[in-house]
Image: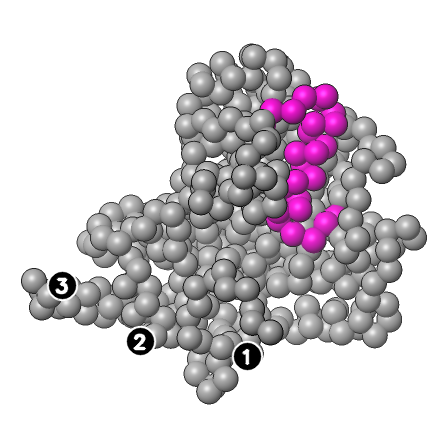
Amino acid sequence: MELFDVYPLYDITPVKGEGCYVFDETGKKYLDLYGGHAVISIGHAHPEYVKAIQEQAAKLGFYSNSIKNPLQQELADKLEKVSGVQDYSLFLCSSGAEANENALKVASFHTGKDRVIYFNNAFHGRTSGVVAITDNENIKAPFNLGHKATKLAFNDIESLKNEIEKGDVAAVIFEVIQGVGGLDEAESGFYKAAADICKENEVMLIADEVQSGYGRTGDFFAFQKHGIRPDIITMAKGMGNGFPIGGILIDDNIEAKYGMLGTTFGGNHLACAAGISVLDVIAEENLMKNAKEVSEYVISEASRIPEIKKIKGRGLMIGLEFDFEIAALRKELLFEHQIFTGASSNKKLLRILPPLNIKKEHFEIFFGAIKKALKNQQIDKIASS
């Protein structure tokens, strides 16, 4: 049987991971500055993470949400403590798309409305509701186009106010720092004004922290820098360090009802064990502090490279924007220097999303490689002209 061919693939087969590195089947070692789309938060095969999953698998890997699972409450309590976010309830699911779908559903239930506002360059997932509020028409099937969704310019508070005042909006959803869209972040004033307008009009404000959450920006959630309180917060990626887990935090003012949400695999015993170990490691190893400190070094070094025209993002969610399209540069970094990096819809932007326990010396390797690669790119450009 053939695999359904929907992914363009690099000819590399990782078989082992350790910390900030992955190894292919030949034993070749790669520096991982992308973390599989920001999923690897505490490093590949972290011993505490491996131990937690192994021990839980030997006891009970799964049972349904029709029974009590104390691990869910333990995860909720630790999440509140480590994040500093209080007076929310936790609903667990299995992915970022599922988290965003459930966030929209809660907002619609609570408000009795059905229209959602999203923003230019947004990416919220590929399932039916969230792909409708993703700014990429190429991945929307006709089936996805029936949702009531309105796209606005990011950072345009007047347009947002005008749409909300029409009275039919259930939710405004935003990535505090856009991921696939290119690491753009609006001004604090925009987020604060959006929060005020939503509150005045009883519209749910949803912060999509699927990529930017779990310490990646140096704060636990990216929205915390802006001094706002979203009604719903969505999470996934770094939440399980590779184990499929997602969740939403729902303001305590929103009432829960039996049957309102449901999931088969969400909050299973193995997923909770993985999620608890991630929170423990983030706290014990001060990974949010590390993200800030390493970020300062990266920004300082990147600012010395003339081909880098703009540095975007915060913490270890970094975008380096060049004055040329970076596809060839990424390939050279990968195949000549064995360094994984990421791309975005901005073809001039190199995305950096490494494990949060990365060190400065790992980035010294990266900057040495990128300087060589940029020199080679210049030589190739001259030769081709």
Image point (51%, 76%), residue name: 14
Q: Are marks 3 and 1 in contact (CB under 8 Å)?
A: no
| Identity of the residue furthest to the right in this view | 67
Quarter that holds the C terminus: bottom left
Q: Residues within 10 Å of mark 2 (few under 14, many from 20)?
A: few
Q: How many marks?
A: 3
Image point (23%, 70%), residue name: 372
Under circle 1, the secondary element is strand
Q: Is residue 336 above or below residue 8?
A: below
What residue would you read off at disc 2?
336
Place of residue 264 in the rendered image (x, y in percent of width and height, measured from the top left): 79, 53
Residue type at mark 2 is Glu
Task: Specify which label sits upstream in the sequence, 2 or 1.
Answer: 1
Residue type at mark 3 is Lys
Task: Specify which label sits upstream in the sequence, 3 or 1.
Answer: 1
- Is 324 on the left-hand or right-hand side of 102? left
Q: Residues within 10 Å of mark 1 (few under 14, many from 20)?
A: few
**CA separation, marks 3 and 1?**
35 Å
What span is in magenta?
92-116
What residue would you read off at disc 1?
15
What residue would you read off at disc 3?
381
Q: Is residue 98 magenta?
A: yes
Q: Is residue 81 visible?
A: no
Query: 276 or 123, which is in the foreground?
Result: 123
Image point (29%, 70%), residue name: 332
